[in-house]
Image (cartoon, rainbow, N blue to C red):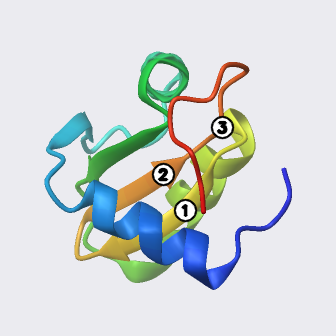
Amino acid sequence: MAALSSKQNKFLRGLAHDLNPVVKMGQHGITEAAIKEISRCLSDHELIKIRVACDEQAAFQEILAGIESACGATTIDAIGHTVVLYKRSKTPKINLP
């Protein structure tokens, strides 16, 4: 996937503002079921929020990198324990500027 421009990133952050987290990851970290659910949500919506319960920043970044590589998603924003992910589907639902 081509890198998003700053204008596209800002546009997607604006769209994600009112979204609620659709996946909540707990103490078990990245599981096969979590990856399947995130992938399914990304294919359905293209833009999702997930919540990662993790106290250490290094572990949080490791989980985030694992999700990105497993799902082929791009991190749009990460604030606190909430992460916004984007993955363009085969039939795009979001028209990027």
Mark 3 near mark 1, Cβ–Cβ under 8 Å? no
**In the foreground, 65 or 93:** 93
Q: Residue at x 73, y 20 (%)?
A: 90
State how far apart marks 3 and 2 are (Cα): 10 Å
**In the foreground, 7 or 29:** 7
Give the amino acid at mark 3: Arg
Residue 84 in sight: yes
Find numbered disc 3 in the image and state the secondary structure of the residue it sits on: loop
Residue 59 in sight: no
Mark 1 or mark 2, earlier in chain: 1
* Residue marked by disc 1: 75
Q: Residue at x 70, y 77 (%)?
A: 5
* Residue marked by disc 2: 85
Q: Tell me residue 24's x, y (percent).
A: 23, 38
**Mark 2, residues whose alpha carbon is within 10 Å: few (<14), some, or many (≥20)?**
many
Q: Residue at x 74, y 46 (%)?
A: 69
* Residue farthest along the right direction in this orientation: 2
Q: Give residue 82's quadrant in the image.
A: bottom left
Give the amino acid at mark 1: Thr
* Residue marked by disc 3: 88
Mark 1 near mark 2, Cβ–Cβ under 8 Å? yes
Find numbered disc 2 in the image and state the secondary structure of the residue it sits on: strand
